[in-house]
Image (cartoon, rainbow, N blue to C red):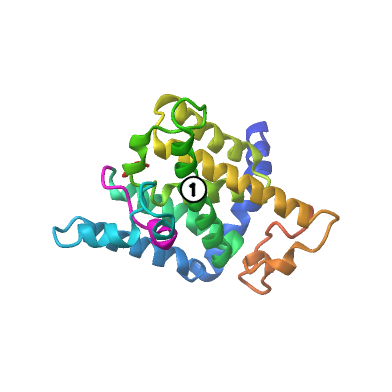
Amino acid sequence: MSTLARYARAEWGPLFSTVRDALLARRLRAVPMTLAAVCLTALFQYVQNQPWGYQFIQNIGSVRAEEPLWLALVRTPLSLFVPALDLPVWGALAQILLVFGIAEICLGWWRTLVIGYAATLAGTLYARVGIELGPQNPIGLPASDAQVIDTGPSAAVVGLAVFVCWRYRAYVTGALVIAVMVLEVLVKNNLAGREHLAAIAAVLVLCAVSAVRHRGGGDRRSDSDGPEAASGPGAGPGPGSGSVKPPTQS
């Protein structure tokens, strides 16, 4: 086996095996939440591009820092599925299908939603803090960003990618995701890029909390509803097995 093949096996082997086994055993039934999310995003895209539907989507899933916090919190769950108007919708659908699908198989549907929501919420709250700090602060934002719509599904996608990479010890891949997001901010310093970094920071905190909870070699299967907790043909070698511990701007 070549050095490159050994590296790829070490980096992606457990993750690939888990996803492959689940899809072979259950096919599309392995990712029902992901399919629902893709359909909901496509529906929102269609509605918001209709003259009669744009304001409706804004009212239920558009989040801006200038709005009251309670209203942003109410809209944030649906904002995960409102694609950016200035980007091709196929990009958002592909991101959700790939990253949400892998996360749903590896983590379970409810944990995928929780982590995705936490990442999106971190970006939403950061926008408010950054505007309060002002552009003179290194992590501050200009007041004009208060009128920019939050990132939509991209913050959740980035956060889930980092968490899954950590959980399955694909550390180099996770580091590359973070590096790309940092480069995005350096090249195009906008609200979306800053919110992506806030989402990553929140997910890294979740990773640290999860690591502390499982310190001491406890059984990771006890708290997961993903395939690593299952038995039977749909179960894969998840992170609980063996030695693996696991605005519109976007």
Q: Which residue is mark 1?
A: 125
The residue under the point 37% across, 35% down is 143
Asked if one can make out residue 30 in the rendered structure from this viewpoint, the answer is yes
Write down the quadrant of residue 71 in the picture. bottom left
- Given residues 165 and 191, the one toward you in this image is 191
Tell me which amino acid carries mark 1: Leu
Would residue 233 appear left or right of 159 to someone viewing this image?
right
Would residue 31 appear left or right of 106 to someone viewing this image?
left
> Residue 93, image x and y in percent?
36, 53
Secondary structure of the residue carrying numbered label 1: helix
Would residue 65 appear left or right of 238 to someone viewing this image?
left
Question: Badge 1: few (under 14), some or many (20 or more) residues near its Cα, within 10 Å?
Answer: some
In magenta, the rendered stretch is 73-86
Q: Quadrant of the C terminus?
A: top left
> Residue 67, image x and y in percent?
36, 52
> Residue 154, image x and y in percent?
43, 47
Q: Residue furthest left?
A: 51
Q: Residue furthest right?
A: 216
Q: Residue furthest bottom?
A: 232
> Count the marks: how many?
1
* Residue 204 is inside the magenta segment: no
Q: Quadrant of the N terminus?
A: top right
The residue under the point 15% across, 62% down is 52
> Residue 96, image x and y in percent?
42, 54
- Given residues 106 and 179, the one toward you in this image is 179
Asked if one can make out residue 246 in the rendered structure from this viewpoint, the answer is no
* Residue 78 is inside the magenta segment: yes
The residue under the point 36% across, 47% down is 66
